Image (cartoon, grey):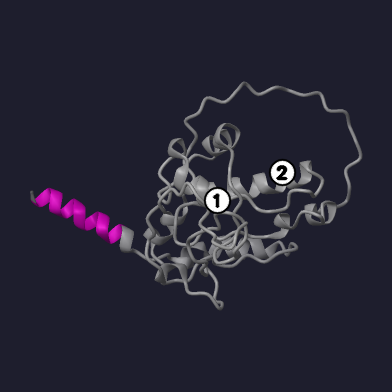
Amino acid sequence: MNQLLLLCLLLATAYAATIDNDSFRPIIEKVNSIKTTWKADPNFPSDITVSSIKRLLGLKKSVHKLPPKQDNDIPNTPIPEEFDARKQWPECPTISQIADQSNCGSCWAVAAATAFSDRLCIASKGKLTTPLSAEELLSCCDSCGDGCNGGYISAAWDYFAEEGIATGGAYNSSVGCQPYPLPSCEHHTEGSLPACSSLPEYDTPRCEKKCTNSQYK
């Protein structure tokens, strides 16, 4: 019994521990000494806990069997000096938009929905520009994983193909059928939004079979 109590205390201490930014200092100094085009700096404030960061790491390792990799013989072609998808497809506004997962381990759903939104717009030559709903994917895809506690991005793409997906923009945007239901927050910067660590650890929203945006027609 005493051993079990000690183990519980150790686990609680580990999850309540804060990030030690000083331990990353040698890496940061090494990167910055190269004097490249960007500057390294600590990602998170010193008072954020390890558990808060792990909460945001929602992508699970895929359990789906992937097809064998095929080696394609690609001829040598000139590579441009730079490539910016925003400039290549200016008719697709979702490419330049950065989605916010809030204090929920839904990065897998947000990433899949935004990536598919971009590809759908490109394939339609700018005719389909409304973002697809990360809320539906997060809440309704039973085979995708555990919602706000993480999911499988490969299963998300299967869901698109088998079930389809509603439209839905960012939180409080009134864009699409099912906009994202959780509020945006500051993940590791100071800004006008509340810090993510100050928000509750959200449960997975309930799956809705109808539009949640009353303004959507």
Judged from the image, the secondary structure of the residue bearing numbered disc 2 is: helix
Kindly identify the amino acid type of the residue bearing the numbered disc 2.
Leu
Q: Nearer the viewer, residue 51 or 192?
A: 192
From this viewpoint, which residue is outermost toward the right? 78
Percent position (x, y) of residue 183? 49, 66
Residue visible at 46% across and 67% down?
Answer: 196
Q: Nearer the viewer, residue 152 or 92?
A: 92
Percent position (x, y) of residue 133? 57, 50
The quarter of the displayed image where residue 200 is located: bottom left
Q: Which residue is mark 1?
A: 134
Q: Which mark is residue 88?
A: none
Percent position (x, y) of residue 142? 43, 38
Seen in the picture, residue 175 relative to 140 is either above or below; the reply is below
Q: Is residue 138 magenta?
A: no
> Principal SS element in the magenta part?
helix
Residue visible at 9% across and 52% down?
Answer: 2
Q: Is residue 102 left or right of residue 28?
A: left
Kindly identify the amino acid type of the residue bearing the numbered disc 1.
Ala
Dot 1, how many residues are within 10 Å of its Cα: few (below 14), some (14-19), or many (20+)?
A: many
Residue visible at 41% across and 68% down?
Answer: 199
Q: Which residue is mark 2?
A: 120
Q: Is residue 135 left or right of residue 1?
A: right
Marks 2 and 1, how far apart in space?
Answer: 15 Å
From this viewpoint, which residue is outermost toward the bottom? 192
Q: Magenta residues? A: 2-14
